């Protein structure tokens, strides 16, 4: 697998848009594209991808926040229709935001498999301003993105020269397909 250090404009745009879309209603995490960049281009490019995805998540979170501020019932219904999101998950996030505050609850979200969009839809009810919530995407989303980038950069380094680009892509895609098959079966929404 040949390393390509340049993180292209297309990849930057795709990572940003993916981060925004997943924070709104898309249901496949930006870790996929962040990991792809890191696998193919190394950790530095993966780090830049993390930043683009997190900034995109801020924009997507702000869009969900704005929708929820205008029409909270419609926004929550749409979020609950996303695969692997359920009413009990939303209720648990609401309870955590009430008990711990919106920021602490959102920081714990990745540990409970609760998507950022759930917190974005609930944030107007919990005292967060739209700007505060959008900026919170950086500390809330970056740690997991960084983990994905580091893990995939290490895998890329380990297989470089031993595995063709095509086989690496097949294995990468297969791993994500298996992960999502397991995730959606074990987290019905």
Image (spheres, rainbow, N blue to C red):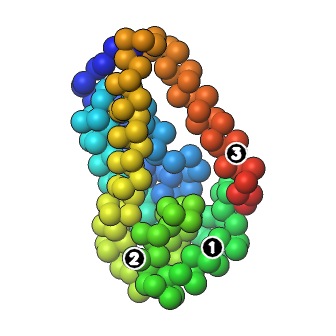
Indicate whether 131 appears above or below 154: below
Do residues under tags 2 and 3 come within 8 Å of each other at their CB atoms? no
Label 3 sits on a secondary structure element that is helix
Q: Residue 49: horizontal and vertical position, in percent?
A: 32, 41
- Residue at x 31%, y 26% (from the top left corner): 41
Residues 105 and 15: in front is 105
Q: Earlier in the sequence, mark 1 or mark 2?
A: 1
- Is 17 placed left or right of 43 in the picture? right
Mark whose residue sits in front, 2 or 3: 3
- Residue at x 62%, y 64% (from the top left corner): 79
Mark 3, other Cα within 10 Å: few <14 / some 14–19 / many ≥20: few
For mark 2, what is the residue? 103
For mark 3, what is the residue? 182
Q: Earlier in the sequence, mark 2 or mark 3?
A: 2
- Residue at x 37%, y 11% (from the top left corner): 161
For mark 1, what is the residue? 90
Indicate whether 95 appears above or below 163: below
Res. 74 visible in picture: no
Spatial CA span between label 1 and label 3? 21 Å
Quarter of the figure that contains the C terminus = bottom right
Res. 30 visible in picture: yes
Displayed quadrant of residue 17: top left
Residues 101 and 17: in front is 101
Q: Residue 113: horizontal and vertical position, in percent?
A: 57, 61
Indicate whether 135 appears above or below 13: below
Label 2 sits on a secondary structure element that is helix
Spatial CA span between label 2 and label 3? 29 Å
- Residue at x 36%, y 79% (from the top left corner): 129
Q: Residue 96: horizontal and vertical position, in percent?
A: 53, 81
Q: Earlier in the sequence, mark 1 or mark 3?
A: 1
Mark whose residue sits in front, 1 or 3: 3
- Is 152 placed left or right of 81 in the picture? left
């Amino acid at each position: 697998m040949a390393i390509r250090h340049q993180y292209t404009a297309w990849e930057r745009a795709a990572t940003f848009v993916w981060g925004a879309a997943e924070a709104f209603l898309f249901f496949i995490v930006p870790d996929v594209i962040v990991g792809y960049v890191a696998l193919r281009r190394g950790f530095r490019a993966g780090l830049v991808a993390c930043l683009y995805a997190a900034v995109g998540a801020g924009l997507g979170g702000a869009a969900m926040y704005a929708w929820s501020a205008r029409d909270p019932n419609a926004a929550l219904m749409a979020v609950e229709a996303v695969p692997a999101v359920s009413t009990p998950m939303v209720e648990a996030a609401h309870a955590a935001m009430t008990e711990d505050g919106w920021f602490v609850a959102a920081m714990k979200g990745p540990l409970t498999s609760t998507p950022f969009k759930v917190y974005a839809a609930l944030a107007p009810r919990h005292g967060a301003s739209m700007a505060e919530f959008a900026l919170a995407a950086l500390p809330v989303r970056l740690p997991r993105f960084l983990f994905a980038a580091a893990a995939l950069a290490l895998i890329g380094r380990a297989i470089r020269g031993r595995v063709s680009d095509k086989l690496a892509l097949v294995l990468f895609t297969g791993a994500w397909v298996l992960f999502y098959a397991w995730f959606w079966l074990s987290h019905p929404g």
